């Protein structure tokens, strides 16, 4: 394998990708790549995929159940024939070049045959050797023969070779006796496998802060000092205490809890000066859930700065603090002490410089994200460079590329980040790989097949009802066994059961068996919402040979247990009613024929800024035609307003390179001075009219990307516009490029953060202004070291590696003074440039107002959305209260919009940096090509159908159908209506207006809705009309 | 204990806006009274005018129809057609002598979980004040149900439905989607057929 290819040009590209790391980023990459027509080898170090997200109880900012949203993806990856999951495996070496690599993988033995293991768990039951349960942060024990967690994919047990009695001492072997499947393989050995792949994606996630750092805060010494990861497991229903937050020392509920932030982050003493970006928000989440568990708990959060800079995060934080009465203290307690009565003592210095101390029952350490422990080893194996914090080294303008061509990096290894950003990068890297390997698309993949559907014609309904606990999400409020037993009494129900998590892979397997065994012909899942989970269960039905339309869900979580948390009995009654209504409907469901629609293999991208151009190139590189529409004369957008990035590069140069590539790309058509006029159609088949200087252009396209950008907020206070000495950061960017950027004898420059943001004109945080202020402060210091720069801020949100700049700025003498929204700075300005602005602000340490005469006053203003209302109405996509596009799922579908085939990236989604914009645009470009690469779509067959016997040919349906999907035809002299299934979107207006009720809707038939109405009847069904 | 009446409320929510809003209310843990039972429909345009009447005949004290904001229907005009059906329902309720407040059609976008909660909480409160169906109306449950069943039958009749087609047609032609205009169109187009309803 050391022999290089003699002439690589002549060799073909390999249509497969290796993804190292099976966390949410890796899994999403695998799913996206499989969808784009590539074979994936998903290499996971541990025994199961899922990563850290599988260990979380909830995810911020919505407090959505983590495993509930992750499990369908894990199951999907597990059942995808084009994703090979290699567990207990690691990369040893990588030879070759982009398009043709050979990855050498070491696969550790599982000692239990994955193919044979049924996941019954007998081995764990009989195993004599207890070990710490890593999944539960070693807060409880598991056996040497175990599965990582109950929803694990693959659903297969494995044996820990370090502790197994048989493997180490040739004794025991009970598991082999207990295993009825005969899956135990004590002679299993390590394997070395060479895998040919076209590209490699590194997604190993993050490492933990060292125990040494944790010990300085009493962890390991005092029982009741927990890491946030341990606390997360305590909160979780599948955790060691079944979801009860108890103090490890006495198993009592803590009444006073303290969260300490920045443990192992923003801390030069442990070498981690960077900010981990996620801890501020996860602490808010954990605090909220701790309060939910115990409404009497008093919770204090100790922050240096509150960094909740993500989309919707500030709003979630403010609501959480207000509703739960959290105390937020701006301080960093240096240590935790024991006071011998079971309490833990914290001491700190408050903002006024006073010494404070207080006792707490439980202390949670919000630990940061480090580079993976084996970053060095992985970097060597893949031959990629690391940065000074051991994360993968990348460039702002190519954030997902490592130093080695053909090897990419995503997720926390690229820099600390949260789940949506990781998932975004996953989509982006899939788009990039799909471009690089475009010629090999579909060369290594197999088509998914399902068994032939069972004909249920003439069968009586045999309904199976599955009631989900969803951990404690449902089970903590609704009496699930009661609902299950109730379901058993309903007509036509022949099977009922309850599951801890209905969406786990083993439950899906059981579902298939149960459907077959009990000859079920209708399925009712009583769990979360059909909007997110219906496809998962429908896929399972198809595996069991049932038509997917024979499915109904009762939404007893999102619309029941979560909204009636304090009314357990009423919620249980409601759940029963919803199940009864769902069963009544299910009995009347009939199999519906699937339809396939062709796809126009091209894209329309609206907006020719950084995001739009990047998205267009990502699409075009994958081999699809793309039209890029820009309102202005020139491409480039508002990135051009920035004169330097934080590394001293000129963003304009990168934008220029990008626009040069866009202009010459044979697959891209650029329309400038043009705007979208109309758009109609649906995924695969959109038709748009673009109005330009030369008239209208009609474009047929399969998908559309909204990269319409944002604009700088224009402040209306602090003398902006009145005095030439008051500038915004954007004005300053331009001014700093002048020959003489600063006024003569410039003594002091004052910057004010959050002008117009965070609850002022704009309710949100614009994420980038703190970094920009620090960057520009450093530029000023470079130009004129003697100029005093003072930054008045609320929270310095220099997240991630930007923290280096913040530190550098302080070292260079930039002054940072915090102000509160209750006491904002005040400014007086004169009319001409001789009158310097006077900035007055309250200084907490001095305890008085301080006046500063500024030679320049710089206002850090945020980013506004370009009003999307009109476009959103055209496309029928929702927008947030802040006028950004609302993604289909905040966590797991960050660039998809609710309407299929419509994607968003850049500032139109939310304020973000250059690097983040590029990754998101690549994600939109990657995701958008999924329907294009399939060449066809199979929409849900919920279309209308006409009963010609009843139809009187009045034509009302034809008149009101918004899609021309129902038309009058003549049968001799008689007029009849007929549905064009391919065009029908299933709205049902035709049915509601049909004068003779001759039209009905698939899955939403008149009779099935009436069955729901009758089943609703609280008095029973005696009043049937 | 003089507890307030605990009403039975049936909802028809469109998949794209109101149903999603209801889900997002859940994700955000916004609490509201546990009286609502939801039937998911793809679009409020699917709402057959007989459904709300049947709902009331089948034990509901109030009916809520939730869709996308006007102009934001996922299928262009479905919620406007729903307003036509809703006007008929209101007409019929008035005719029978049932408080029109027992039937509400309102909007919440996918992003408006809290708004959905506000609407449902207020509606539940109002229906609770009205009490069991028949109480505010001073009618026996038997009488009211048989009248509702008749009204539902009428809503399925060709005469009424052709009236609705005409109202929908005129609404689309004039592109006037105000509730009052739609209501007067329905009154006018269905006047004769409604007159026959005793």
Image (spheres, coloured by chain):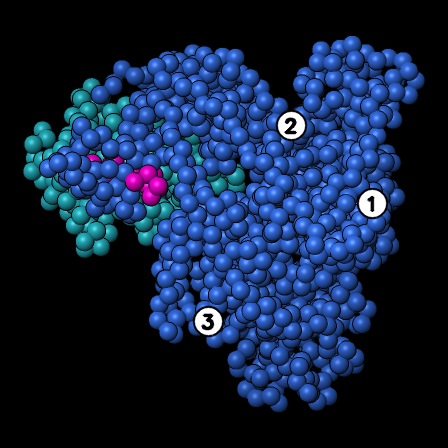
Which numbered disc, 2 or 1, marks the residue that appears first in the sequence?
1
Q: Mark 1 falls on what kind of element? A: loop
Q: Mark 3 falls on what kind of element? A: loop
- Name the mark on residue A672: 3
Is A988 a magenta residue?
yes
Q: Quadrant of the C terminus of chain B?
A: top left
Q: Is residue A592 visible?
A: yes
Is A689 a magenta residue?
no
Q: Residue at x 11, y 45 (%)?
A: B188
Which numbered disc, 3 or 2, marks the residue that appears first in the sequence?
2
Do badges 2 and 1 share one subunit?
yes
Q: Is residue A820 visible?
A: no
Q: Is residue A264 above or below residue A868?
A: above
Q: Residue A502: where, in percent of width, then height?
A: 56, 25
**Foreground residue among A55 and A339:** A55
Task: Give me the C-alpha separation between circle 3 and circle 2.
Answer: 51 Å
Q: Mark 2 falls on what kind of element? A: loop
Report the span colored magenta.
Answer: A980-994
Q: How many marks?
A: 3
- Name the mark on residue A151: 2
Q: Which chain is cyan?
A: B
Q: Residue B80: where, in percent of width, then height?
A: 26, 47
Instruction: State left or right for residue A180 relative to residue A767.
Output: right
């Amino acid at each position: 394998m050391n022999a290089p290819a003699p002439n690589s040009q002549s060799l073909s590209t390999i249509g497969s990708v290796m993804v190292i790391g099976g966390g949410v980023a890796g899994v999403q990459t695998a799913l996206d790549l499989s969808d784009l027509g590539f074979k994936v080898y998903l290499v996971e170090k541990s025994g199961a995929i899922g990563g850290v997200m599988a260990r979380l109880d909830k995810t911020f900012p919505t407090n959505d159940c983590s495993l509930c949203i992750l499990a369908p993806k894990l199951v999907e990856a597990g059942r995808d024939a084009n994703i090979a999951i290699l567990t207990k495996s690691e990369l040893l070496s990588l030879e070759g070049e982009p398009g043709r690599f050979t990855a050498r993988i070491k696969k550790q033995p599982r000692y239990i045959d994955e193919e044979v293991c049924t996941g019954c768990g007998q081995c764990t039951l009989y195993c004599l050797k207890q070990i710490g349960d890593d999944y539960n942060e070693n807060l409880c024990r598991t056996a040497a023969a175990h599965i990582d967690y109950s929803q694990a994919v693959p659903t297969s047990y494995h044996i820990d070779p370090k502790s197994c009695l048989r493997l180490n001492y040739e004794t025991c072997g009970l598991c082999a006796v207990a295993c009825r499947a005969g899956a135990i393989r004590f002679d299993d050995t390590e394997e070395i496998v060479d895998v040919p792949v076209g590209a490699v994606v590194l997604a190993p996630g993050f490492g933990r802060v060292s125990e040494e750092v944790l010990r300085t805060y009493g962890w390991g010494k005092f029982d009741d000092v927990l890491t946030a990861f341990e606390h997360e497991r305590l909160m979780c229903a599948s955790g060691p205490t079944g979801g009860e937050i108890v103090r490890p020392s006495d198993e009592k509920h803590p009444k006073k809890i303290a969260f300490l932030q920045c443990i192992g982050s923003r801390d030069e003493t442990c070498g981690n000066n960077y900010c981990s970006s996620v801890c501020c928000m996860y602490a808010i989440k954990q605090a909220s859930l701790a309060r939910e568990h115990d409404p009497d708990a008093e919770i204090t959060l100790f922050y240096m700065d509150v960094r909740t800079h993500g989309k919707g995060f500030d709003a979630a934080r403010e609501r959480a603090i207000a509703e739960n009465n959290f105390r937020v203290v701006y301080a960093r307690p240096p240590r935790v002490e024991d006071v011998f009565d079971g309490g833990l003592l914290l001491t700190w210095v408050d903002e006024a410089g006073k010494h404070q101390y207080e006792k707490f029952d439980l202390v949670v350490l919000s630990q940061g994200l480090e580079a993976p422990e084996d970053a060095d080893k992985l970097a060597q194996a893949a031959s990629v460079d690391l940065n000074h914090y051991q994360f993968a080294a990348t460039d702002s303008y190519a954030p997902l590329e490592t130093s080695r061509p053909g090897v990419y990096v995503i997720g926390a290894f690229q820099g600390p980040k949260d789940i949506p950003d990781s998932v975004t990068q996953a989509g982006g890297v899939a788009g990039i790989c799909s471009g690089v390997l475009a010629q090999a698309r579909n060369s290594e993949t197999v088509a998914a097949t399902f068994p032939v559907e069972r004909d249920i014609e003439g069968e009586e309904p045999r309904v199976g009802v599955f009631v989900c606990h969803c951990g404690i999400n449902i089970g903590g409020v609704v009496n699930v066994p009661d609902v299950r037993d109730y379901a058993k009494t309903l007509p036509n129900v022949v099977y009922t059961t309850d599951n801890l998590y209905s969406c786990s892979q083993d439950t899906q397997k059981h579902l298939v068996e149960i459907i077959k065994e009990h000859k079920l012909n209708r399925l009712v899942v009583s769990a979360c919402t059909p909007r997110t989970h219906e496809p998962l269960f429908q896929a399972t039905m198809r595996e069991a040979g049932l038509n997917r339309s024979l499915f109904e869900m009762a939404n007893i979580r999102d619309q029941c247990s979560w909204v009636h948390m304090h009314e357990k009995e009423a919620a249980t009654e409601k759940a029963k009613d919803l199940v009864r209504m769902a069963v009544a409907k299910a009995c009347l469901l009939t199999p519906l024929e699937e339809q396939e629609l062709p796809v126009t293999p091209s894209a329309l991208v609206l907006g020719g800024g950084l995001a739009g151009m990047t998205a267009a190139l990502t699409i075009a590189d994958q081999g699809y035609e793309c039209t890029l529409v820009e309102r202005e004369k020139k491409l480039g957008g508002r990135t051009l307003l920035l004169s330097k990035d934080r590394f001293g590069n000129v963003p304009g140069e990168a934008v220029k390179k990008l626009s040069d590539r866009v202009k010459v790309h044979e697959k891209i058509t650029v329309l400038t001075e043009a705007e979208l006029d109309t758009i109609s159609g649906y995924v695969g088949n959109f038709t748009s009219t673009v109005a330009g200087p030369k008239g209208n252009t009609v474009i047929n396209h399969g998908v559309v990307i909204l990269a319409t950008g944002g604009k700088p907020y224009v402040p209306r206070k602090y003398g902006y516009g009145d005095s030439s000495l008051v500038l915004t950061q954007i004005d300053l960017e331009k001014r700093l490029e002048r020959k003489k950027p600063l006024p003569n004898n410039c003594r002091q420059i004052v910057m004010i953060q959050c002008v117009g943001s965070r609850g002022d004109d704009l309710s949100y945080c614009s994420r980038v202004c703190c970094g920009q202020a620090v960057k520009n402060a450093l530029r000023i210091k470079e130009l004129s070291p003697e100029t005093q720069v003072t930054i008045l801020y609320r929270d310095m949100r220099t997240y991630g590696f930007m923290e280096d700049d913040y530190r550098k700025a302080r070292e260079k003498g930039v002054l940072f003074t915090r102000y509160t929204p209750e006491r904002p700075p005040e400014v007086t300005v004169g009319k001409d440039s001789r009158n310097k602005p006077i900035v007055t602000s309250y200084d907490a340490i001095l305890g008085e107002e301080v006046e500063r005469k500024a030679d320049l006053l710089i206002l850090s203003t945020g980013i506004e959305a370009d009003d999307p209302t009109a476009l959103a109405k055209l496309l029928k996509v929702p927008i947030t209260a802040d006028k950004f596009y609302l993604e289909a799922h905040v966590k797991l579908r960050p660039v998809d919009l609710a309407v299929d085939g419509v994607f968003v990236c850049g500032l139109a989604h939310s304020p973000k940096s250059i690097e983040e914009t590029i990754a998101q645009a690549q994600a939109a470009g990657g995701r958008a090509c999924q329907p294009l690469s399939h060449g066809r779509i199979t929409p849900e067959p919920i279309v209308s159908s006409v009963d010609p016997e009843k139809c009187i040919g009045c034509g009302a349906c034809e008149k009101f159908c918004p899609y021309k999907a129902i038309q009058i035809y003549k049968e001799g002299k008689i007029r009849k209506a007929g549905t064009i299934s391919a065009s029908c979107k299933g709205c049902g207006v035709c049915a509601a207006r049909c004068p003779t009720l001759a039209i009905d809707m698939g899955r939403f038939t008149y009779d099935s809705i009436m069955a729901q109405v009758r089943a609703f009847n609280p008095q029973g069904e005696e009043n049937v009309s | 204990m003089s507890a307030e009446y605990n009403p039975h409320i049936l909802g028809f929510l469109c998949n794209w806006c109101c149903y999603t809003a209801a889900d997002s209310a859940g994700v955000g843990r916004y609490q509201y009274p546990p009286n609502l039972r939801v039937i998911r429909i793809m679009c409020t345009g699917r709402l057959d005018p007989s459904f709300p009447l049947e709902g009331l005949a089948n034990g509901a004290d109030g009916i809520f129809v939730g869709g996308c904001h006007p102009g934001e229907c996922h299928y262009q005009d479905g919620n406007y057609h729903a307003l036509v059906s809703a006007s008929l329902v209101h007409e019929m309720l008035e005719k029978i002598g049932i408080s029109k407040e027992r039937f509400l059609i309102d909007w919440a976008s996918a992003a408006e979980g809290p708004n959905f909660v506000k609407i449902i909480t207020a509606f539940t409160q109002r229906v609770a004040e009205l009490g069991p169906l028949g109480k505010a109306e001073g009618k026996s449950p038997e009488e009211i149900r048989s009248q509702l069943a008749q009204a539902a039958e009428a809503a399925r009749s060709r005469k009424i439905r052709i009236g609705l087609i005409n109202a929908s047609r005129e609404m689309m032609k004039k592109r006037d989607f105000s509730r009052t205009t739609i209501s007067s169109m329905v009154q006018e187009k269905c006047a004769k057929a409604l007159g026959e309803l005793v």
